[in-house]
Image: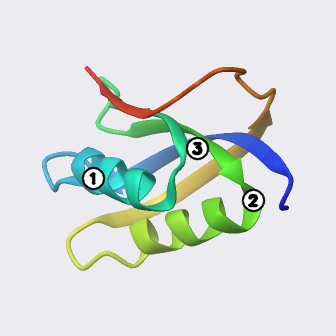
């Protein structure tokens, strides 16, 4: 079994008003990942995601290659696991 990890991502670019949060939520459900995604006041999007590392890599790659979403920069930071987390949420 792949090691469970949790990452914080910060995305800038054309990432709001293009379905980023909706797409992230659908992908997270499909990949059985947990965490959350939310729009920030400066036009960026932040996201925390937990699951197997290889699965998270695939999840992020699908966001990066979306036809409408345009990520100009992305930062990533490893976090401690959140025990008992059951789903992926869109936060407002």
Mark closest to the chain's N terminus, 1 or 3: 3
Frontmost residue, 78 versus 40: 78
- Helix, strand or loop under label 3: strand
Q: Based on the displayed image, in which of its 4 quarters is residue 21 positioned?
A: top left
| Residue furthest to the left | 17
Q: Is residue 82 visible?
A: yes
Q: CA distance from mark 2 to mark 3?
A: 14 Å
Quadrant location, the C terminus: top left
Dot 1 surroundings within 10 Å: few (below 14), some, or many (20 or more)? many
Question: Could you tell me residue 17's position as x and y percent?
Answer: 13, 47
Frontmost residue, 59 versus 32: 32
Q: Is the C-beta separation of discs 2 and 3 under 8 Å? A: no
Quadrant location, the N terminus: bottom right
Residue that mark 2 sits on: 53
Residue that mark 3 sits on: 9
Question: Could you tell me residue 65's position as x and y percent?
Answer: 40, 79
In percent of the image, x 39 and y 51: which residue is there? Answer: 29
Q: Based on the displayed image, in which of its 4 quarters is residue 5 positioned?
A: top right
Q: CA distance from mark 2 to mark 1?
A: 21 Å
Residue that mark 1 sits on: 20
Q: Is residue 63 above or below residue 10?
A: below
Frontmost residue, 29 versus 21: 29
Q: Is residue 37 visible?
A: no
Q: Is residue 25 above or below residue 34?
A: below
Does residue 88 appear left or right of residue 15 in this picture? right
Mark closest to the chain's N terminus, 2 or 1: 1
Mark closest to the chain's N terminus, 2 or 3: 3
């Amino acid at each position: 079994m792949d090691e469970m990890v949790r990452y914080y991502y910060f995305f800038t670019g054309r990432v709001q008003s293009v379905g980023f949060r909706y797409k992230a939520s659908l992908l997270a459900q499909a990949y059985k990942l947990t965490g959350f995604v939310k729009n920030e006041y400066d036009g960026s999007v932040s996201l925390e995601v937990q699951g197997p590392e290889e699965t998270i890599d695939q999840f992020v790659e699908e966001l990066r290659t979306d036809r409408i979403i345009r990520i100009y920069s992305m930062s990533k930071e490893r976090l401690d696991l959140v025990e008992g987390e059951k789903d992926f949420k869109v936060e407002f």
